[in-house]
Amino acid sequence: MNFKKYLMIGAAVAGLGMTSCVGDLDLKPNDPNLVDTSDPNFKANSLAMCYAGIACSGISGPGSSYVADLDPGTSAYLRLMFTLNEFCTDECVWIWPDAGVSDIVACTWGANNGLLQGAYYRLMGHIAVCNQFLLNTKDDTDAETQEMRAEARVLRAYSYYNMMDLFGASSFCTEETNGQDPTQISRADLYKWVESELKDIVDNKLISENPVYGRVGLDGAEALLARLYLNGQVFSGENRYADCQKRCDNIIARHQGGGFEGSGLAEHWHYLFSLENKNYMPGGANKAENEILFGIAFDADMTQSYGGPTFIISSTISNTHYIPRQNYGSSSEWSCLRGCAEMAARFPGAPEETQDVRDDLWFKGVMPAGKDEAGNKWDAEDYSDRFVGFTGAWATCGGNAIIKFTGRTANAAKDGGWNWNADGTPGWPVTTFSSTDQPIIRLADVYLMWAECYVNGQVGERQKALDYINLVRRRAGAPNTDSQSLTKQGIMDERSRELYLESTRRTDLVRNGMFAGPTQTIWQYKGSISNNAGTRIAAHMNLYPIPQAVLNSQPGFKQNPGY
């Protein structure tokens, strides 16, 4: 199956035939004539809607949204997940004072924040898409349809996981209650439901171990279950570290023998975030190194979005004087996403000193005049680790260039190098929209989850936990570390070095008691956009509030404590 073809079709009709599970949420258009179950391609097209609901904003290209009255760029699914999981942390900051964003950066949000409303509606809209597919295929018992249904259930579980993580309590509906008034489900009860869904799919092998490229398979489903268990104490009040570690063991065992040191990890870290990372996706060409266990496919022509990798790449390219956008495969430079000082501190020294490739696309500190690797000149820039302040002007707020995702193509024959042309120009396309795929969960995360289960849950073997941390570090070119990494702070620092800009940081901080409450850590701008040193925030901010618009439409719904 040419899955990108079906993704394009899915994007063109995403949201058709849906009924709302939020209440007054308007999902448009709702024309059952465009969902023809007699069409031989109906199932493939409809399943593609479930994927396109995560990749694309709407039915008419990147400037449209299938959720009414939402800005299609800011409210793109993966962009919202990034915004709410990264901007409020010690990894990065959005320097342009867009409405609602500054409150997320400063951790001063309230129930009327438009981004929170957008996230709630976007997630529930995607759940409605998946419910519709499941409803329309409920009587089909053939093996192919059953596997497609399992995929839709995993994608729906992913959205419910995000609801549970961000908002705690959630509107709740399934294909069995489609069309009925929504109910509010508690975080603990939603946790049990998501666990039951994923265990059924994984333990009964309802989903392929070798999925078609771009589609979720057994690894992705079990990795999501492992991530659920990792956060079990927060989500349900129950320690599930032993269950998380068991799921990690299953995934790791399936990937032994290929890749870096036979671990299944990709040989080259940068390749996972560049144009050819499709090879490392489920069903990708490089099966021995299919490190991306769960990812969303993108294409510059077929799946255009102002979210996803297009958003991450364009926003981290900060100024053509020192970051020529064409060197990273982008025709756009948004100049609005910067790395925090606390993030830079996790990579002491210059990349050539540490040998850690995870920051060798960065620019830190005062940048001298010089040339990039293609010979392009840049001007001297005072690009300090500390921000000057939010002036409302592009590229005037200091910070670090924190580039990770790119549109480059790699050359394995050059030992992890890039395909530059002989004349020093980029050997890759320069496009408005990115064809780089977006990882959701990677195998490196699974190794680090296993280690954290030892640190926080005291399950498993100490040496194995250290070996897994060092495996991830060696792949990045960093030296082995000792038992100092087997602490809460040590594992958190390593997770940040490996997983920054992958929308995991807020959840990691909350799980380890570092985001809010009595054991929180402090970083610049936390608690106040004008306070470079940062301040404390209240414990109730470990959860976002239920948006006021949802409460207004559903008077029986309860707000989270503290709001």
Image (cartoon, rainbow, N blue to C red):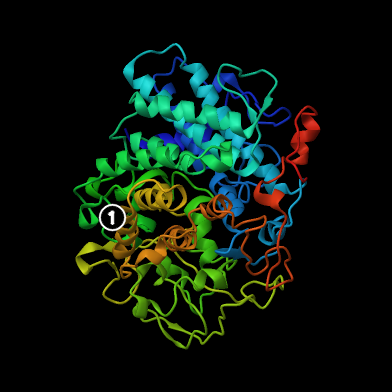
Q: Position of residue 398 (x, y in %)?
A: 60, 77
Q: Residue at x 37, y 58 (%)?
A: 274
Q: Is residue 43 left or right of residue 107?
A: left
277, 8: nearer the viewer? 277
Dot 1: element: loop
What residue is drawn where x is 67% and y is 55%?
517
- Decide: few, some or many residues near mark 1? Use Cα within 10 Å; few <14, some 14-19, many ≥20: many
Q: Image quadrant of residue 525?
A: bottom right
Q: Is residue 92 visible?
A: yes
Q: Is residue 551 left or right of residue 221?
A: right
Q: Which residue is mark 1?
A: 266
The picture places residue 139, in percent across and down from the top left corner, at: 44, 11
**Among all residues in the image, which is located at the extreme top?**
139
| Residue in front for this viewpoint, 262 or 214 | 262
Residue 285 x/y as whole percent: 25, 46
Quadrant position of residue 374: bottom left
Does residue 482 sit above or below 284 in this rendering?
A: below
- Position of residue 316 measured from the top left corner of the image (x, y, whole percent): 52, 65
Name the image quarter holding the N terminus: top left
Looking at the figure, which quarter contains the C terminus? top right
The amino acid on which the numbered mark 1 sits, given as a three-letter code, is Ala
Would you say 52 lies left or right of 417 here? right
Left or right, 544 with reference to 412: right
Total marks placed: 1
Residue 44 seen: no
At x 39%, y 79%, the residue is 372
